[in-house]
Image (cartoon, rainbow, N blue to C red):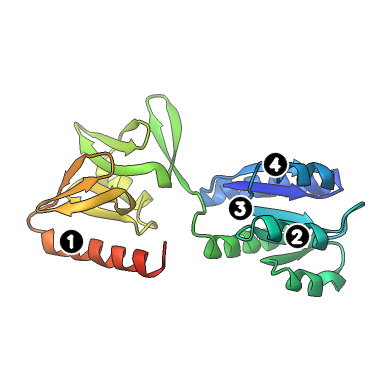
Amino acid sequence: MYVAIVDDSLLDIEYLYENICRYCNEHKAHMQIDRFEDEHDFLNSLKTKAYDLVILDIYMNRINGDKLAQLIREKYPKSQIIFTTASKEYAVKAFKVRALDYLVKPYKYEELESALDHFEEVYDKFIHYIELKEGRQYTRILIGDIMYVDYHNHYIQVHTTSNVVRSYMPFDKFSPMLKPYRQFLWCYRNCMVNMDYIDFLEDKDFVLTDGKRIPISRAMHNEVTQTYANYMFEYVSKGS
């Protein structure tokens, strides 16, 4: 998740940066944040980088935020924009460039939190993570990187696209961490698979994109396969 803060006030940039970090910690979200005090530096960055979210001061020294927003829209139509400003008089301009939200300075954390919640609702690639204790340290695992999770010898084994994270804990203590994410499906006791990584269903197994076969519980077979079929139908019908 790439986020840009564009504001000609360094104090406002730091305030916003600290509160976005607070939001990420409280909501288990992951954002990579770039900060720009100069409009031209931001425009140069757009030549090589697409931002998922731009939080933009509408009144800048050289190029007003509404003009910057138009340039963002032309190059990256899917980027979301949240305006910040000291005056309400620019609300109409924000509406014209289809800004996601509009924060009037000085705004409280709760107002920013509401705007970012709104962003999460409309942006289907919002990046979340879970945190597990691995040995003596805690490891963050991006939800989108988890292919499946199983259990062996009292250890949770989180199989990601790049490695396996092992954490000593009961499965029933771990599973609630994935409950908010509907792409995870119970295949059998102590095993959950990310349906986004299922390549196809073959008889009694799911075959993942890396070739790994995940068996399906005989007792749960009809329920599991129907849930997967429903998920895929929604996925295709939305044009994902």
Marks 1 and 3 sit apart, C-alpha to C-alpha, by 34 Å
Where is mark 2, residue-wise?
Answer: 69
Q: Residue at x 31, y 46 (%)?
A: 173
Q: Which residue is mark 3?
A: 52
- Of 194 and 201, nearer the camera is 201
For marks 4 and 3, give the CA distance: 12 Å
Looking at the rendered structure, the kind of residue marked 4 is Asp
Q: Say which element carries label 3.
A: loop
Pick whichever of labels 4 and 2 is earlier in the sequence.
4
Q: Which residue is mark 1?
A: 225
Q: Position of residue 40 (x, y in %)?
A: 83, 45
Q: Secondary structure at mark 2?
A: helix
Mark 1 residue type = Thr
Distance between mark 1 and mark 4 Cα atoms? 43 Å
133 w.r.t. 180: above or below: above
Pointer 1 or 3: first along the chain: 3
Give residue 34's mark: 4
**Dot 2 crowding, Cα within 10 Å, few <14, some 14–19, many 20+:** many
Local packing at callout 3 (Cα closer than 10 Å; few below 14, some 14-19, many 20+) is some
Could you say whether the residue bearing mark 4 is in a helix, strand or loop?
strand
